[in-house]
Image: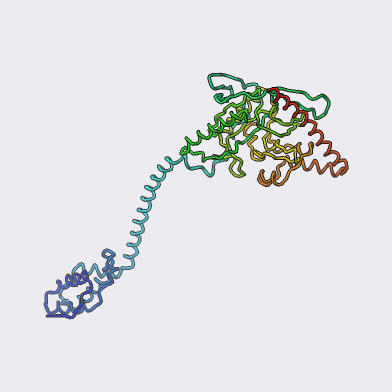
Amino acid sequence: METNFKIQDERYAKMVDQYSRYIKSPVLRLKFLQSALKTDAPQKWAWRIPFLGSIPERARLVLELSKVLPPDQPAPFSFRLASIVWRLRYVAYALCMAMILSIGAGLVYVTSKIIGRFSAATEAKEALHQPDADAPAQGEAVASIGSEAGLTLDKVWLAEEGEGYEFYSNGARILTEYQTDGAERSFYRFDMEANSSDQIMTRPVGIIYHLSEGDLLPFDDRYNSSLRGRSKSLLEYARDHRLYNYVIDRFGRTYRIVRDEQTANHAGNSVWSDSHNLYVNLSPSFIGICFEGRSDRKKTVGPDGINEAQIYAARVLTAVMRSKYRIEDANCVTHGLVSVNPANKLMGYHTDWVAGFPFEALGLANKYNHELLAVSRFGFNYDQTYISAAGGRRWAGLEKADAALKESSRRDSLAAERGRAERWEIYQRAYSKQHALDEARAKSE
């Protein structure tokens, strides 16, 4: 017997056939099949849900089956179960959804733990390549050196000397493999009060801190060989041109270039006063210490700039120099604060460390807070280029110098103008005497 039923889903057809087997009468079975197969087949997407997806169709088949079963034939248990589940279907759906969510959450948790362990292992391997955004720009080891732990200058001495090095009691280690000779020190100390004649001296009275201003690679072990190569090139260049007395490379190693008792060519036209004495053209009078680094308003001091190792090396080297030559704190300054151009009477012919030098980390008073006497007492001025090199801001010492000049002008404009000319004459006289001494020394060489 042919039928016009079009079976749209094989699984549904199998379910209809399974339910029809409960009917013993062929006639009733055919009647059931006709009514069951006339209904539309279920949506295939619903059947993807195990068991619950077929509940609506099972309930419909039970209803159709109940129409043809004899009244005295008891309904099978599976039929009664399907009816109960249909009536409670929303509860069943909710329980099923809760189970799916629980299983999903469990999978997410397990996956996150696995990924976390993998990430932790990866981060441990790459720790040297990842800078800590929350780390202080100044290393904790340097910043935490307390006054109670600090060594007074009388506790600093040469503890050991060997082939290519000197070792000091405060931990300073000076390497001497690039050491060379320079001109003998000879310079004037000009008395600011004019109570005594100008003195010619031969022992250094101050320290000037410089930057090498060369190109820098990221401070990373991937560039280790290149970092060492660039440091070596800087040391060789500094030695060949007698540029500094000391160079501190990016690994914190301290190299002596020109001997302490001799002059390095590091300061050029420069002026500094400690309020009692005036020094000009500071190469003969000040020791030059150069950091391998580069001026940058944002990154001069930091992991890829002047780093903790260099700052610590400079701290102990400064203590050695101050102990050995009785150098006053007031005469430990940076190149950007002393460099001048006499031709146009402007500050800042060189601007390295015109801002940002970590004076306190080296155990020194912050010279950016001290009145810049070259401006207020010796007739020098400054322009926007000088301010820009400091990050666009005037620092406290420059503002004090400006305030001192304004106060002079407020009292007496003519006297202030005469005072500026007189201050310039003081500098010019000192410059001429020191320049003549430098030329005489150069001829003698």
> Which picture quadrant has residue 66?
bottom left
**Residue positioned 27% across, 67% down in the render:** 47
Count of numbered badges drawn on the protein: 0
Residue 95, image x and y in percent?
Answer: 33, 62
Which one is in front, 120 or 407?
Answer: 407
Could you tell me residue 283's position as x and y percent? 68, 29
Name above or below for residue 431 compared with residue 297: above
Left/right placement of residue 3 relative to residue 114 reads left
The quarter of the displayed image where residue 19 is located: bottom left
Is 37 left, or right, of 400 in this rendering? left
Compare residues 228 and 65 and report the one nearer the observer.
Answer: 228
- Residue 204 image offset from top left, x and y in percent: 69, 25
Q: Residue at x 42, y 40 (%)?
A: 125
Is 26 placed above or below 159 here? below
Q: Is residue 319 visible?
A: yes
Quadrant that contains the N terminus: bottom left
Q: Residue at x 15, y 72 (%)?
A: 22
Q: Please report the residue visible at 63 percent of the width from the left and 36 percent of the height from the top.
A: 358
Q: Is residue 27 above or below residue 407?
A: below
Q: Residue 251: image x %, image y %?
A: 53, 33
Nearest the viewer among 444 and 128 is 444
Give the quadrant of the C terminus. Answer: top right
Left or right: residue 322 versus residue 44 is right
The image's colouring method is rainbow
Whether residue 148 appears in this view of the structure is no
Quarter of the view holding residue 249: top right
